[in-house]
Image (cartoon, rainbow, N blue to C red):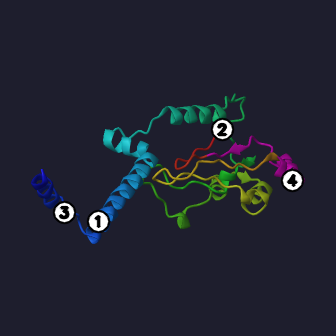
Amino acid sequence: MEQKAKKRSRQLKPIGTAKAVLVYILCAVLIGAMLVGNYFADAYRELITVYLSGSGTVSSEESEALCREIEREGMVLLKNDGALPLNSGAAISVFGQDSVDFVYGGAGSGSVDTSKAANLKEALEASGFSVNPTLWDFYSTGPGKDYRKTTPDETGAGTFAVNEVPYTLYNKDVIDSFASYRMPGTTTSPPGGTPMTS
């Protein structure tokens, strides 16, 4: 019995302190790498799913519900009672902070040299329309200048928010200017990369 115990004690030699510390450090690094990997896998799960599926579409119940809510809030049924199309020279008011914070690039990889691009006011005036300068200044340099949209970046980080100017900030001068620009107003509301005007 004593011989067996001696034999076993010879087989189970304790590792040195330096080796033990090295093994503990290695284990800690592996656990840390797993935690970081799980964090990023969870944060970018929809992007990873799209990449691995090859479908090019991110879809989840949460994103579909958000899309339905945005559609409900953004859809308007309009009746054309002869006001459209606008005649050349029409005096119009362009509503919405996106009129001065226009999206020039398209969805995906679209990009534009904005130094050579006309802004919306210049484009409308070049087409023969007269744009309400009081309202334009309200959005570009007045109280409306502090309200700009935010959009997620290409990895999905960040939030989408319209951040439209509250009605309470439209001062008397701006509201009175609508009388001189009585033609139907144009609203702008481009989402994160694809401009739309209505």
Q: Amino acid at mark 1?
A: Ala
- Whichever of labels 1 and 3 marks the residue nearer the N terminus, that label is 3
Say which element carries label 1.
Answer: helix
Q: CA distance from mark 3 to mark 2?
A: 92 Å
Q: Which residues are magenta?
A: 168-189
Which residue is labeled 2 in the image? 85
Q: Amino acid at mark 3?
A: Lys
- State which tag comes first along the sequence, 3 or 2: 3
Q: Which residue does the numbered mark 4 point to in the structure image?
A: 171
Q: Work out whether residue 45 or residue 158 is closer to the camera in this orientation and state it.
A: 45
Amino acid type at circle 2 is: Pro
Q: Earlier in the sequence, mark 4 or mark 2?
A: 2
Q: Which mark is residue 139?
A: none
Can residue 128 be seen in this snapshot?
no
- Give the spatial CA distance, label 2 vs label 1: 81 Å
Q: Residues within 10 Å of mark 3 (few under 14, many from 20)?
A: few
Q: Pick whichever of labels 4 and 1 is earlier in the sequence.
A: 1
Asked whether the residues under the numbered discs 1 and 3 touch, taking CB atoms below 8 Å apart as contact, a structural biologist would say no
Residue 78 included in the magenta stretch of the image: no
In the depicted view, which residue is nearer to us: 51 or 19?
A: 19
- Check the picture and name the quadrant holding the C terminus: top right
The residue at which mark 1 appears reads as 20
* SS at circle 3: loop
User: Mark 3 — residue?
Assistant: 13
Query: In the drawing, does residue 140 fall left or right of residue 51?
Result: right
Q: CA distance from mark 4 to mark 1?
A: 73 Å
